[in-house]
Amino acid sequence: MSVISHDPIYRLHSQCRIADGPVRSVLVDLDRRMYETIPNGMFDLLRMLEVDYPMKWSCISASFAEEEQSVLDQYREWLLARDYIYEVLDGTQSNWSELPVRHEQPNSLQDGIIDLSKDGDYPLLPVIRQFELTGCKRVQIRDFDGHRLGELRTTLAAMHRSIVCNVHLFLRASTDSILLAAEFAAHAHITIIVYHGCDQEELKAITALALPRVHGFAKCIADEGCCGRIVPDTFTINHQFMSASGLANTCLDRKLSIDRFGNVKNCPSLNRSWGHASNLDILAVLEDKEFRSVWSISKAQISICQVCEFRDICSDCRAYVSVPSDLYSKPAKCAYDPYTAKWQP
């Protein structure tokens, strides 16, 4: 343990966020895009560094019992070693500023989902043009069965100057779709391509392509029921997501979707529809207050989520809830219990 020869002032780095739970807490590093679980006692220390800043270490130490001093020093050394906190030098106390709580986007629509299958025959390119009217730049296209692969190819080619510049493709694996991987990956607006339902030979073929933005996995995504699962692998750690989590729904906020039948919805898994994609007036839908009402459902309003230490990095789901009649009940596909800090199998 290092010897502190003076009485320093410490500060939690601005890219770090903390959240407490009933049993343990979480420290999130947005720059490194990682999180660590920490004892609630360490959370209390970090809150003091934030709330009572600029308080000298001797004053902080004095607020803890004598038997807690050894653990307190261990917490400090651990935080310093991982560069979560830093010593504030004399004269710099007033130069520290927090990152903004939430970055508002100039456009009213932030995300889109478009599902494709043999069940729907709505025209794809006009739907894309509707998304462009809102200034939406991020769209996820999920092809469940490969039935509309040719139309998808034509649409992507026509989008070379589209404002929709961040497209995630989920494609049903087949010989024909994998042959198009290099062509699709060459489009500047395609950020990732994921093939689902791959057999061993298809996985080998995808690996052989050696395209950094193209991936494959064995599980087949047959319909919108794939959504809503909450596990650590689905946590999202970035400033935009985390800053919005306390004020809005981290799944539905500023999102519009087209399900595989062509119904216009907040999410393909929700029941209510706001018309059909074949005659979509996206600006009119976005003006509907009921459509926008689910955007603002935050974790603070949801049972159990409001006390969970993972609340700021967890994707929420209002389509699959534990009590179907209660929109504010726990996500049905979340197996975590914050009161025991355990994930159920």
Image (cartoon, grey):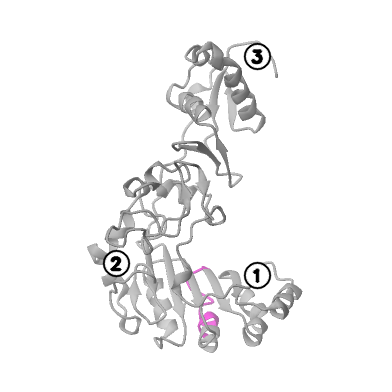
Q: Nearer the viewer, residue 342 or 233?
A: 342
Above or below, 46 against 24 in this view is above
**Crowding at label 3, few (<14), some or many (≥20) Cα neighbours within 10 Å?**
few
Q: Circle 2 — which element?
A: helix
- Point out the image quarter for the C terminus: bottom right
Q: Circle 3 — which element?
A: loop
- Mark sitting earlier along the chain (2/1): 1
Image mark count:
3
Label 1 near label 2: C-beta < 8 Å?
no
Residue located beneath label 2 in the image: 286
Q: Nearer the viewer, residue 44 or 237?
A: 44
Mark closer to the observer (2, 3): 3
Estimate the x, y position of residue 45 in percent, counting from the top left: 50, 25
Estimate the x, y position of residue 19 in percent, counting from the top left: 46, 38
* Residue 114 relative to residue 195: left or right: left
Name the residue located 69 percent from the left edge and 67 percent from the top edge. Answer: 212
Label 3 near label 1: C-beta < 8 Å?
no
Name the residue located 63 percent from the left edge and 71 percent from the top edge. Answer: 217
**Crowding at label 2, few (<14), some or many (≥20) Cα neighbours within 10 Å?**
some
Separation of marks 2 and 1 at Cα, in angstroms: 34 Å
Which label number is shown at residue 4? 3
Estimate the x, y position of residue 14 in percent, counting from the top left: 52, 35
Locate residue 193: give its quadrant: bottom right
Which label number is shown at residue 215? 1
- Mark sitting earlier along the chain (2/3): 3
- Mark sitting earlier along the chain (1/3): 3
Separation of marks 1 and 3 at Cα, in angstroms: 50 Å
What span is colored magenta in the figure? 154-166
Name the residue located 62 percent from the left edge and 11 percent from the top edge. Answer: 6
* Residue 89 relative to residue 309: left or right: right
- Amino acid type for the residue under numbered disc 2: Leu
